[in-house]
Image (cartoon, grey):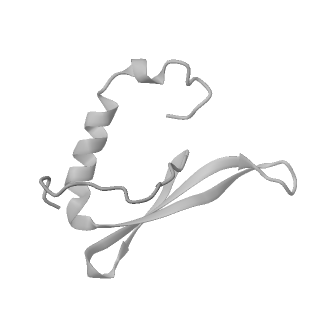
Amino acid sequence: MAQSTPITEPFAVLDIFATEMARADRLPCGLIRFTLVAEQISCHDGSIERAVVARIVMPAAVMPEARRLSIEAEMQGPELFAGCEGVAH
């Protein structure tokens, strides 16, 4: 997408916490689907389980930009993680 196209948020979009990206599946028409999961305690037996919390479908063509943005975000510095010792990063 062109960077000059404005980003709008006409309604609240929730953040979703995930502890890992479990899968990346190639779909028809040049798309990729990412499956994100979060570790949680099972309400059935108390064991640790990995629950699917989101699936994101994106054009494969935007992956280079997604990688670049991820690297930039990671390089913002470890001070952003201060106080987050119990959270996987």
Q: Position of residue 14 (x, y in %)?
A: 51, 52
Which residue is painted at 83% across and 54% down in the image?
A: 43
Q: Position of residue 42 (x, y in %)?
A: 79, 53
Q: Quadrant of the N terminus?
A: bottom left
Which residue is painted at 21% across and 51% down in the image?
A: 65
The answer to which of 18 and 12 lies nearer the viewer is 12
Q: Position of residue 72 (x, y in %)?
A: 25, 35
**Left or right relative to 21: residue 87:** right
Which residue is painted at 27% across and 51% down in the image?
A: 66
**Left or right relative to 51: residue 44:** right
- In terms of image quadrants, where is residue 57? bottom left
- In terms of image quadrants, where is residue 32? bottom left
Is 64 above or below relative to 87?
below
Which residue is painted at 47% across and 55% down in the image?
A: 13
- For the view shown, which residue lies furthest in the bottom direction? 28
Q: Position of residue 28 (x, y in %)?
A: 32, 82
